[in-house]
Amino acid sequence: MAASAATADSSGFARPVDVRAGARPHAGARPPRVPWIAMYHSVGDRFDDPYRVTVTPGRLDTQLGWLRRRGLRGVSVAELLAARARGEGRRLVGVTFDDGYADFVTHALPLLRKWNCGATLFVLPGRLGADNAWDRLGPRKPLLTADGIRHAAAEGVEIGSHGLTHVDLTEADDAALRAEVSGSRARLTELTGAPVAGFCYPYGTVDRRVADAVRQAGYGYGCAINPGALTGPYALPRVHVGESDTAARLLMKTGLHRWRRRASQGV
């Protein structure tokens, strides 16, 4: 199902397009490779970071600079998929930030602008202005308020759903699954005034039932971490990028991802 989303203008930030995430290759054509999508979470102080979900602003600055020096540009997943549907996008890398931490606006957004990059921010409309209560260890970190999300959207960041409350959807019953998937999309559409094309599975976990629910709710794509046997636009794998990822490690991860790429059809 095609979904209206966003792609970048000359500044690297978003303007509306049609995301053809589910487009199939022409008969006899070589199946497209799964795109390289980086996964970030919080950007800030790493004094207490047991889950390794935080990068410092300095490290993010270095990583975005590394991309640009290699002739690559970080973009939202919507832009990446739209470019690939046109047979383009070889020099684009998806950049995602999970959970919607408040530090995205204060620390990540200025660096994205500095390096002329875009990004997708996956947020939790059921936890607006709350914190990361699902992380039992480590510090409580504030999440964006409705105003913070609207600010990010106004700056051209693609806003996607991470569900309502950050629960493992593979363990949710059908009613809870619908609320987390369809309910979060409706809330975000109302909050931002724009359609929501992207979904990110909490904890990165997905099965066919969950992927089908995301597709049926009208999303154009779904991001996981390692979706196992599932492939396609509703089971996009991503690469974790953390504080320890220097230029050498990023180069290694780029190479390893080439080996794990599969045809992007499937679910």
Image (tube, rainbow, N blue to C red):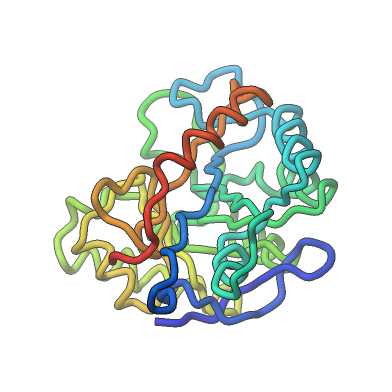
**Observer-nearest of 50 and 58:** 58
The quarter of the displayed image where residue 16 is located: bottom right
Query: In the picture provided, is 218 more to the left or to the right than 48?
Result: left
Determine the residue positioned at 42% across, 55% down.
223
Determine the residue positioned at 43% across, 74% down.
25
The quarter of the displayed image where residue 55 is located: top right
Vertical placement of residue 107 versus 197, above or below: above
Q: Residue furthest top?
A: 47
**Observer-nearest of 201 and 69:** 69
How far from the left and from the top, in percent, is residue 155?
A: 75, 63
How far from the left and from the top, in percent, is residue 23?
A: 44, 76
**Observer-nearest of 24 and 199:** 24
How far from the left and from the top, in percent, is residue 245?
A: 60, 25
Quadrant (top left/top right/bottom left/bottom right) for the C terminus: bottom left
Query: In the picture provided, is 81 more to the left or to the right than 63?
Result: left
Query: In the picture provided, is 142 more to the left or to the right than 62?
Result: left
Vertical placement of residue 131 versus 31, above or below: above
**Observer-nearest of 225 and 231:** 231
Vertical placement of residue 106 versus 200, above or below: above
